[in-house]
Image (tube, rainbow, N blue to C red):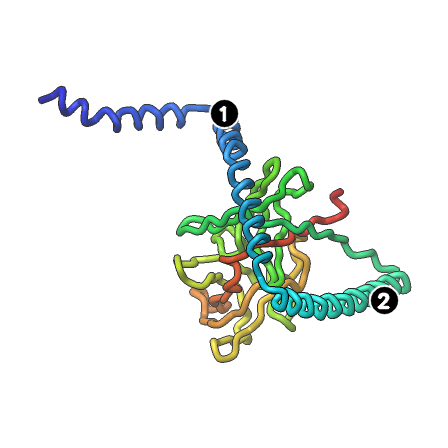
Amino acid sequence: MPKKRFLQTRPFLALGIVALVWAILPIVVKSLSRISFYEFQAPANLAASYARDLQTFWAARLHSKNELIAAGRDLARLNAAYELTIRGNESLRAEIARLERLLNLPARAGYRYEVARVVRRDFSAWWQQIVIRKGKNYGIPVGAPVVFTGGVVGRVREVYAYTAVVDLISSPNIRLAANFDGDNRPVSFQGGPSPSFAAPRGRVHYVPLDIQASEAAPKRLVTSGLGGVFPPGLPIGRVIRLSPGPDGLFNIGEVELDERLGALTEVAVIIPTSEE
């Protein structure tokens, strides 16, 4: 009987020994093991991502000629609209540069956008992150902000040889300075909590008492530019609820984030050109 009990406890004993050995290993060895394991499985993730792109390409080839002609016509309209927007932006940049020279103001920091495909999405109660298909091979730095057409996506947390891990703005690990659209007073934004199978949410703190927001009259929250990570004016979300904080000096509220965060296929990493 004791031998049978010993055989039943052998898996737990082995697990305890492995946990003890892992606990006493140096931090350098742990980091190298984690990075090596991640780099080992990265090619499989990249291959699956390229396979999905190839599947999408061949699926588009099955459409009829009329559908392709209609899609080409819509794409031409979009290209014309984007061309007008680009020319308008170029004229605005030239005017800003002229005013900076007249007033002897220092030039603003320049940025470049590195567009990357999303390889994998990891959503759970502990973290909300995505893996993108570019890393050190494209000069992606740790801490770089990530955006899409709807505003802020998150921030790069880890960079590997060919991939990078991005903490989504809905993650509790994300904190950034923000302000309300049209109001330059800074507030604090923090991601989460975002329950599974629900729209992403965030929290806003240190809101002045004279600012009010509700679901019927939400307030738009944007980045303030403080801290030098996120450029100012990037959309974060909509504040749909405000209530007095525990100290009674400020309001706290709930931020409704873009629902497309959970289905992104392509994002853009903002890289300061001064760092290059």
Which of the two residues, 75 or 17, is positioned nearer the viewer here? Answer: 75
Q: Quadrant of the N terminus?
A: top left
Q: Quadrant of residue 178?
A: bottom right
Inspect the image, locate mark 1, and give the three-letter code of the amino acid beneath it: Val
Is residue 85 placed above or below 54 in the rendered structure?
below
Secondary structure at badge 1 equals: helix
Name the residue rendered at 77%, 66% in the picture. Answer: 83
Is residue 262 placed above or below 35 in the rendered structure?
below
The mark found on residue 95 in the picture is 2
Name the residue rendered at 41%, 62% in the picture. Answer: 198
The mark found on residue 82 in the picture is none
Q: Picture coordinates of residue 180 (x, y %)?
A: 60, 69
The mark found on residue 29 in the picture is 1
Q: Quadrant of the C terminus?
A: top right
Which of the two residues, 193 or 248, is positioned nearer the viewer here? Answer: 193
Disc 2 vs disc 1: Cβ atoms closer than 8 Å?
A: no
Confirm whether residue 148 shows in the render: yes
Is residue 186 placed above or below 228 in the rendered structure?
below
Q: Picture coordinates of residue 238 (x, y %)?
A: 53, 69
Name the residue rendered at 72%, 49% in the picture. Answer: 272
Inspect the image, locate mark 2, and give the three-letter code of the amino acid beneath it: Glu
Left or right: residue 62 compared with residue 20: right
